Image (cartoon, coloured by chain):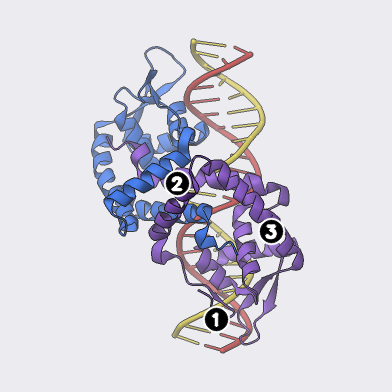
Chain colours: A purple, B blue, C red, D yellow
DNA sequence: TATTGTTATACTCTATAACTATA
DNA sequence: TATAGTTATAGAGTATAACAATA
């Protein structure tokens, strides 16, 4: 009698699906999907650039998945890959000026999409949800090493 | 500066991914993935059987996706499709005795998988999370019509 | 006409393995 | 030997459209 509506795992999957769908719809005007947006946001926030490996760890993706995402963003002129000054292996992903601009608009659109799903929850409740989810995610969210420095 | 670790949408996706992965791993011994398990659970809970269309609505899937899931469960002998006594269009999905048995073991395994990700949260906190997620999912979770009767 | 199940198709996401160049 | 990036591939999940049988 373990009703699915009381199953935290099921509810997480369902809520996540709805929010991703709403966010993708909100971002479609800008030609972005939510995964690309998250890469753009991290690149934009890391002044000097962020290594793809660190992007992968931060986003919980395999490095091989990041390649395609960065390729697409680069093709759209929103990010570029720069060599690291200290190590020739990594390629630091950094937002272009256009990328920074698009990111700003995308952040606002995405926020709108999320709120369309969160509508019922007060700000305080959303903060509670955020805190609980952060603990579920817990240690699984990697520390962000951008350009070789700890930015945590 | 909208750090992803404070983004509810991102956290939902991340948490959901981790829980699904843990649950799939916990269910692999039984040859089930989490989506199949959820179909089996709904079929098992609906004594007289549940129409595939209602499964789809309950799970937030397209009816066409349900076909393959039921096919797999039926091939494994865990569910079977029965005609509805009152309408020849729908096919009511019902758990076989073996399906009921497997479902019981799967429920316990899945619970263990989820708890491995939820470990940090107390029972009360999990209940809070559950309640908040139910409101995010909100009206999007369809009412379950099994065998033509409202079972909500 | 509308509904149920089904097939087909395409795209996205996830998961691995192997290769290269650099360290 | 280890790390960063890349390529390739296969499987799972998501999204539509169209069709047959039935209501």
Above-or-below relation of A144 to B5: below
Q: Name the residue under label 3.
A: A104
Residue sitting at 37 percent across and 44 percent down? B130
Q: Is residue B42 above or below residue A62?
A: above
**Local SS, label 2:** helix
Q: Is residue A70 above or below residue C7?
A: below
Disc marking residue A13: 2
Along the viewing direction, whichever of A84 and B29 lies nearer the viewer: A84
Q: Which of C20 and D4 is in front in this view?
A: D4
Q: Which of marks 2 and 3 is nearer the N terminus?
A: 2
Is label 2 in contact with label 3 (beta carbons under 8 Å)? no
Question: Relative to residue B59, is residue A68 depicted above or below?
Answer: below
Mark 3 neighbour class, 10 Å CA radius: few under 14, some 14 to 19, many 20 or more:
few
- Please state if A8 lies on the left or on the right of D8 as rendered: left
Nearest the eye: B116 or B27: B116
> How far apart in space, not on screen, are marks 1 and 2 (Cα)?
34 Å
* Residue at image coords 45%, 65%: A141
What residue is pinned by disc 1?
A149
As helix, strand or loop, the secondary structure at mark 1 comes to strand
Assess disc 2: are there few (<14), some (14-19) or many (≥20) residues with their C-alpha within 10 Å of its C-alpha: many
Q: Where is residue A50 in the image (x, y as percent from the top left)?
A: 60, 73
Q: Describe residue C6's horizontal placement relative to residue A37 as left or right.
A: left
Percent x, y of residue B69: 43, 38
What residue do we see at 40% from left, 51% from top? B20
- CA separation in Å, label 2 and label 3: 28 Å
Q: Mark 1 lies on which chain?
A: A
Q: Nearer the viewer, mark 1 or mark 3?
A: 3
Q: Residue A27 placed where, x, y %?
A: 66, 49
């Amino acid at each position: 009698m373990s009703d699915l509506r009381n199953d935290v795992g099921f509810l997480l999957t369902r809520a996540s699906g709805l929010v991703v769908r709403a966010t993708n719809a909100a971002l479609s005007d800008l030609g972005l999907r939510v995964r690309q947006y998250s890469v753009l946001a991290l690149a934009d926030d890391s002044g000097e650039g962020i290594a793809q490996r660190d992007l992968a760890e931060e986003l919980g993706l395999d490095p091989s998945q990041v390649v395609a995402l960065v390729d697409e963003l680069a093709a759209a002129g929103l990010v570029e890959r720069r060599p690291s000054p200290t190590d020739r292996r990594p390629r630091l992903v950094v937002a272009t000026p256009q990328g920074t601009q698009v990111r700003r608009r995308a952040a606002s659109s995405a926020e709108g999409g999320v709120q369309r799903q969160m509508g019922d929850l007060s700000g305080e409740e959303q903060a509670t949800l955020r805190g609980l989810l952060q603990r579920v995610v817990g240690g699984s969210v990697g520390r962000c090493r951008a350009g070789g420095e700890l930015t945590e």
